Image: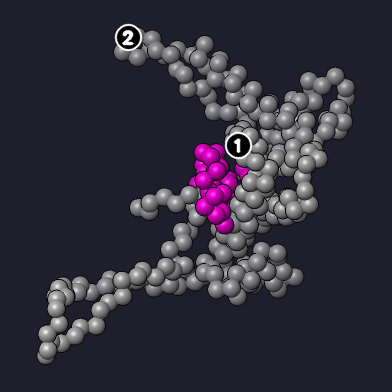
């Protein structure tokens, strides 16, 4: 879904968030999208085109988070619903901590969307810095009769929110507004298509019998467009090895009576079967193992 120019601007945080497990990618991008949206909507420089992209991005983000929370089986087989619960608990703890530092009661409601997003990011970063500094200053271990310092601190107090905040910072600080809108929109569309194609067919059929889940209609559109669904990939036979061919004689000057051998085409035909089965297709191309 990302063209070559957009792939080039994706930093380490974007790449790492898309190369992990799918359910974790969904929750990280949902939090990061919300933080970016809060900061971007406070700007008065967003034109109508970008606003439409942001509205679609927010809608897909909310819907995918809804699937992870209430229909994890449809999001993807093996999706962990507890990631959504864990993220909610982390956000609640951060908000309570921020509110306790405010002078007025219920002061969070009076904060602007962009200010609240910045406070969440700052809080997640502050917790990590405090724990790392404490580990460096206090923790000492003895190895081979000499003391060495341990510079690796404990894991973040809020791991999901911490990683999502780092992703949001990269999107906000290292991309222009138009590029950021395009990357977020295309990543979410890619996630939506991937989830629809990897969901099991009987779940889509069951959903349609109960009124229809939006993901099932996406799956129907992809099927009509010829995209490979999970069932197609499971039923595809393994390609048979090509028989070895005898080397052809080198072509030389034609002489009368010589048999003319029909040449083989030399161009390689690209097929859709080369697409990977994870979100790495959204990232810069890397050599396959």
**Quarter-of-image position of residue 263:** bottom left
Q: Which residue bears the numbered disc 2?
A: 145
Give how far across and how far down residue 1 sits, in percent.
57, 57
Q: Is residue 267 left or right of residue 79?
A: left
Residue at the far top in the pictured view: 146
Q: Is residue 40 left or right of residue 219?
A: right
The mark found on residue 174 in the picture is 1
Give how far across and how far down residue 289 sits, in percent.
35, 52
Quick check: 135 above or below 96? Answer: above
Q: Residues within 10 Å of mark 1 (few under 14, many from 20)?
A: some
Q: What range is drawn magenta here?
A: 1-30
Q: What residue lies at 65% left-to-right and 28% top-to-bottom?
A: 124
Q: What residue lies at 41% left-to-right and 50% top-to-bottom?
A: 286
Q: Is residue 34 left or right of residue 248?
A: right
Q: Secondary structure at mark 1?
A: loop
Give how far across and how far down residue 21 sits, in percent.
52, 48
């Amino acid at each position: 879904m990302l063209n070559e120019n957009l792939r080039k601007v994706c930093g380490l945080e974007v790449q790492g968030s898309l190369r992990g497990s799918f359910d974790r990618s969904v929750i990280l991008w949902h939090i990061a999208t919300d933080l970016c949206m809060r900061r971007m909507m406070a700007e008065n420089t967003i034109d109508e085109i970008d606003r439409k992209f942001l509205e679609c991005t927010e809608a897909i983000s909310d819907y995918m988070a809804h699937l992870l929370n209430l229909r994890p089986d449809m999001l993807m087989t093996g999706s962990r619903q507890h990631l959504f619960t864990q993220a909610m608990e982390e956000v609640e703890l951060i908000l309570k901590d921020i509110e306790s530092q405010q002078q007025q009661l219920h002061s969070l409601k009076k904060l602007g969307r962009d200010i609240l997003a910045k406070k969440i990011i700052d809080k997640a970063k502050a917790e990590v810095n405090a724990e790392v500094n404490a580990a460096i200053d206090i923790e000492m271990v003895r190895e081979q009769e000499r003391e060495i310092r341990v510079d690796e601190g404990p894991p973040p107090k809020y791991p999901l929110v911490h990683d999502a905040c780092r992703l949001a910072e990269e999107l906000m600080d290292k991309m222009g507004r138009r590029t950021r809108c395009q990357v977020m929109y295309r990543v979410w569309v890619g996630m939506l298509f991937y989830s629809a194609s990897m969901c099991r067919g009987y779940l889509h059929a069951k959903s349609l019998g109960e009124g229809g889940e939006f993901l099932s209609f996406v799956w129907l559109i992809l099927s009509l467009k010829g995209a490979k669904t999970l069932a197609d990939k499971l039923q595809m036979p393994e390609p048979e090895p090509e028989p070895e061919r005898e080397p052809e004689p080198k072509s030389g000057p034609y002489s009368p009576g010589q048999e003319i051998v029909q040449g083989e085409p030399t161009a390689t035909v690209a097929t859709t079967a080369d697409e990977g089965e994870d979100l790495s297709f959204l990232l810069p191309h890397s050599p396959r193992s």
